[in-house]
Amino acid sequence: MFSRRMLLGSAGAAVLAGKASAQSTYPDRPIRLICPYPAGGATDVLTRILADGMRERLGQPVVVENRSGAGGNIGVDVVAKAAPDGYTLGTAPVGNFVINPFLYSSMPYDPVRDLCSMSIAWEVPNVAVVASKHVPARTLKDFLVWAKAKRGGVTYGTSGVGTSAHLCSELLFKRAGVACTHVPFRSAAQVIPAMLSGDVDFAIDNLASYAGIIQQGEMTALGITTEKRWPTMQQVPTMAEAGMPDFVVTAWSSLIGPAALPAAIQEKLSAAVQAVAADPVVRQRFLVAGAQAIGTTIAGARERAERERPMWKEMVELSGARMD
């Protein structure tokens, strides 16, 4: 006759066996991938490229769902509070990890405590641009000379307060001693028409949003915020080459899940992202969209966030930006 302890032990073993089995067969149904920004934007486009690559490697549909608002915090919070079964994941740009905690006095989630990052999936450089029709400068040095001479200073557009575009712009103009006025918009899709009409003088924002219009000749690219020249725009100098040293700033995005996601599932997802990033066809799709596929280990994703957190904190403090 079995004792109560033996029965409980058997039940516990069965539960553990069931969990192990579920993890070993994961995924066995579609995965929801939350994009915390609106459809049609750079993060959405890149999230969908990642979703296609994950689907091929995981053998299940990866369905992108846009949940935008509050600087990406709404969508990321959905992931943070999701069941830790691997069927609700998300993409989270650098802002949601290491910028927003310094912008908002209250956050709905703690990026360290409530989230896990399986892999940095891609990174996007910022590119400094002016409208060719309205600004005569064709180099960064000439633009800064023009900007200093402009009565009332220059205006610059961004996709919002506290974005990497905002922080990079403030860093550039403070270093150069240029008077400037920030004109925030909801997205780069609104900044571009304002620049083309002459209402805004300058932008330094993600290449994914500006690559097409630069190639059309309507925008002049003055510099790119990478250490080396960008593969698809070899004609554009780095910021260091353009005369602004120590200005390597890229906006990366991670595949995220709730913190309690089992280690076996995290590892499987990390391996999938790394495989996506290693695929030459997918890498080219990212490059055409203005990004570079990365694919890191879990430890690599954690290390980069920790390493860059002090830098972004300093940039937020320098800009004086707050979202309260």
Image (cartoon, helix red, strand yellow):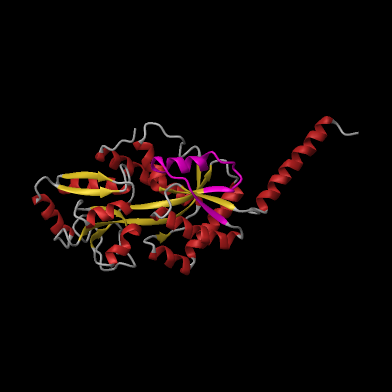
**Of the pair 66 and 282, the residue shown nearer to us:** 66
Give the quadrant of residue 229: bottom left
The segment highlighted magenta reads 62-89
Q: Relative to 321, does residue 34 appear above or below in the rendering? A: below
- Which percent across, then down, holds residue 212? 32, 64
Q: Is residue 321 left or right of residue 74?
A: left
**Of the pair 166 and 38, the residue shown nearer to us:** 38
The quarter of the image holding the C terminus is top left
Q: Is residue 308 visible?
A: yes
Q: Is residue 44 left or right of residue 138?
A: right
Q: Relative to 5, does residue 187 appear above or below in the rendering? A: below
Q: What residue is drawn where x is 9% and y is 47%?
A: 151
Q: What residue is drawn where x is 38% and y is 37%?
A: 101
Residue 91 located within the stretch drawn in magenta = no
Q: Relative to 5, does residue 80 appear above or below in the rendering? A: below
Q: Can residue 246 be seen in this view?
A: no
Residue 87 located within the stretch drawn in magenta = yes
Give the quadrant of residue 290: bottom left
Q: In this view, does 294 lie to the left or right of 52?
A: left
- Which percent across, then down, holds residue 158? 28, 48
